[in-house]
Amino acid sequence: MAMVAVTKVVTVAVATKPSIKQKAPHRVGRLLDEPEAYTIGWQPFMGLKIYLDSKPLIPRPETEWWTEQLLLHVGRTTSYMKFLDLCAGSGAIGCAVLAKLPDAKVYFGEIDQSHEATILKNISENKLDCARAEVRIGDLFQPFSDMKFDVIAINPPYIPIERELPTSVADYEPTIALRSGSDGLDLIRRIAASARCHLTERGTLWCECDSEHAETAKQLFRGQGLSSEIRTDQYDRPRIIVVSFR
């Protein structure tokens, strides 16, 4: 049976959160404010069952919505492609691509090694083609050297450090997948600086961002000589930056 390729290019120290403060349990034994997806252990995403064993960021409806838009777009423009799910977390986006685009080779890039097993489980349990999947652990594009991709999809951390979040998010979901500097753009700055080195000539990059800083995020890519545009989500909020050479 084919096995998913796993490459560990660099060793990355990931800061882990302190233990969660114990809260009063519900009568069913669930911790107060704990997200239901963590309690049951999985989240639906584009018809797939995405397991959350390593407690990655829980896939949101907004991410599911733009992933579907991305698939509609790339499905019309190409057949075989090299696809990168960067900041993969649970691997939900890449798994959706494996399920919907039978000719795509999908790479998963993730900094937190603890999520590797979760990505592999989501590929296996959803009966996806593991021969077309490869997981690489490391910091952003570092595990991919000079590889170029036809499509890069990224749901990076983009929440400003000082922004208040619901307890169910702040106390349970991984900070490293949520926050990124004082304006939430630290990681997107790094992505913009490296993007053109990893896109094919006709490639596109889709990056989720904070609605309040969408215009600034767009300009970060334009500052690197790339074309970029803002697209709204299903709630008509600025949510996605779509980037290309055109």
Image (cartoon, rainbow, N blue to C red):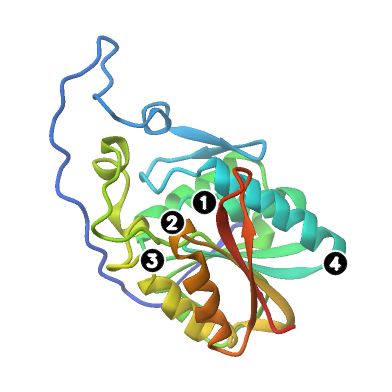
The answer to whether one can see residue 242 in this image is yes
What residue is at 36 percent from the left and 32 percent from the top?
A: 35
Residue under label 3: 111
Residue 180, image x, y percentages: 33, 65
Task: Check the image and report above or below for 196 versus 29.
Answer: below
The nearer-to-camera label among 1 and 3 is 3
Q: Quadrant of residue 181?
A: bottom left
Amino acid type, residue under disc 4 in the picture = Thr
- Is residue 242 or residue 177 the one in the foreground? 242
The nearer-to-camera label among 2 and 3 is 3
- Dot 2 lies on which element? helix
Residue under label 4: 77
Q: Can you tell which mark lies on residue 35?
A: none
- Is residue 176 or residue 179 the one in the foreground? 179
Residue 113, image x, y percentages: 36, 61
Give the spatial CA distance, label 3 vs label 4. 30 Å
- Dot 3 lies on which element? loop
The nearer-to-camera label among 1 and 4 is 4
Label 2 environment density (alpha carbons within 10 Å; few <14, some 14–19, many ≥20): many
Q: Quadrant of residue 103?
A: bottom right
Amino acid type, residue under disc 2 in the picture = Glu
Question: In the rendered image, which quarter contains the C terminus?
Answer: bottom right
The nearer-to-camera label among 2 and 4 is 4
Kindly indicate whether the residue at mark 1 contacts the one at mark 2 (C-beta within 8 angstroms). Answer: yes
Residue under label 1: 120
| Horizontal arrangement in the rendering, residue 89 relative to residue 100 (left or right) | left
Residue under label 2: 116
Q: Quadrant of residue 201?
A: bottom right
The answer to whether one can see residue 138 in this image is no
Give the spatial CA distance, label 1 vs label 3. 15 Å
Q: Earlier in the sequence, mark 2 or mark 4?
A: 4
Give the spatial CA distance, label 2 vs label 1. 6 Å
